[in-house]
Image (cartoon, rainbow, N blue to C red):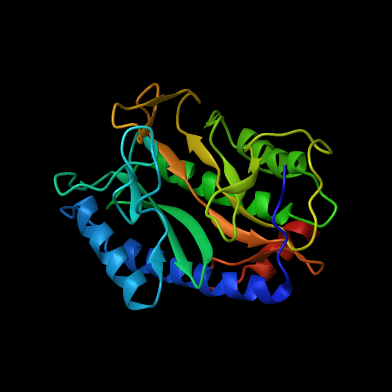
Amino acid sequence: MRVQVKSPEQIELMRVAGRLVGETLALVSAAVKPGVSTKDLDRLAEENIRSNGGIPSFIGVPGPITPFPATLCTSVNEEIVHCIPRDDKILRDGDIISIDCGAIVDGWHGDAAITVPVGEVTPSVQKLLDVTEESLWRGMAACLVGATLGDIGHAIESYVRSQGRFGIVEGYGGHGIGTEMHMDPFIANVGQPGRGMKVGPGMVFAIEPMVNLGKPGTDELEDGWTVVTEDGKYSAHFEHTVAITESGPQVLTALEDGTARIAKLNAS
């Protein structure tokens, strides 16, 4: 396994791509409402990325049947990840939608995702969103020089397990990122402390927990892309791109770098 290590200057270049992803997610999230199609959101994202000098990362990614055809993955309710936007997929009150976005600027990638409620959702669904997002921050806070991949997975897993009976999706997870969108290492959302590869300065990871309201089992649909929950219950997905530095994790896709939030977690 060869893990790409970036210089501080290269991390700053990745921050440009990351900021564009964060700004695009903020724009698209604000457009989420009942009656909007997932393809409407996709068009908005592509226009924003291209008009700001970026290239959508996902378009043309090879798949088992066809290359991915869109700028966003827009996964609704029981869809976990990788769902293709469609004009006939209309959002309804009470839905949730995972919006996964990637962009390339000057050869460097940013990758992030957020799950957004559509109108009013039930308290149990809102808790699913809150727990999944917080588990992402717990995982990023564990991205410290000298930590292991097992420490990162354990930080995510232990927090989710402490919050109730949720299913943590296995087999899908985070990854290295840099001059390519998906690079070594694979980063599971479960783990044992002290196990796995050690984390070093200059590594950059996309951390992305996927948590189900029901059981952790998954199915893949016939399109070769869409992954859904096996039991048909809702799933949430959050992701950020984070750089490991001697001074601590830097969140490259957050509109604010997240340093204060991570420092508070590590101090507790």
**Residue at x 77%, y 33% (from the top left corner):** 192
- Please indicate, yes or no, whether residue 268 appears anywhere in the rendered image: no
**Residue at x 74%, y 63% (from the top left corner):** 202
Q: Is residue 215 left or right of residue 92?
A: right
Which image quarter is the N terminus in?
A: top right
Number of marks in picture: 0
Q: For this rendering, which residue is in front, 180 or 257?
A: 180
Position of residue 217 measured from the top left corner of the image (x, y, whole percent): 47, 23
- Identify the image quadrant of residue 190: top right
- Please indicate, yes or no, whether residue 237 appears anywhere in the rendered image: yes
Q: Is residue 140 above or below residue 109?
A: above
Position of residue 33 measured from the top left corner of the image (x, y, whole percent): 23, 57
Q: Is residue 261 left or right of residue 68?
A: right
Position of residue 54 measured from the top left corner of the image (x, y, whole percent): 41, 71
**Residue at x 47%, y 45% (from the top left corner):** 237
Q: Is residue 218 above or below residue 131?
A: above
Which image quarter is the C terminus in?
A: bottom right
Q: For this rendering, which residue is in front, 97 or 51?
A: 51
Position of residue 257 measured from the top left corner of the image (x, y, whole percent): 61, 71
- Identify the image quadrant of residue 209: top right
**Residue at x 82%, y 67% (from the top left corner):** 246
Q: For this rendering, which residue is in front, 137 or 104?
A: 104
Q: Is residue 128 left or right of residue 256?
A: left
Q: Is residue 146 left or right of residue 204?
A: right
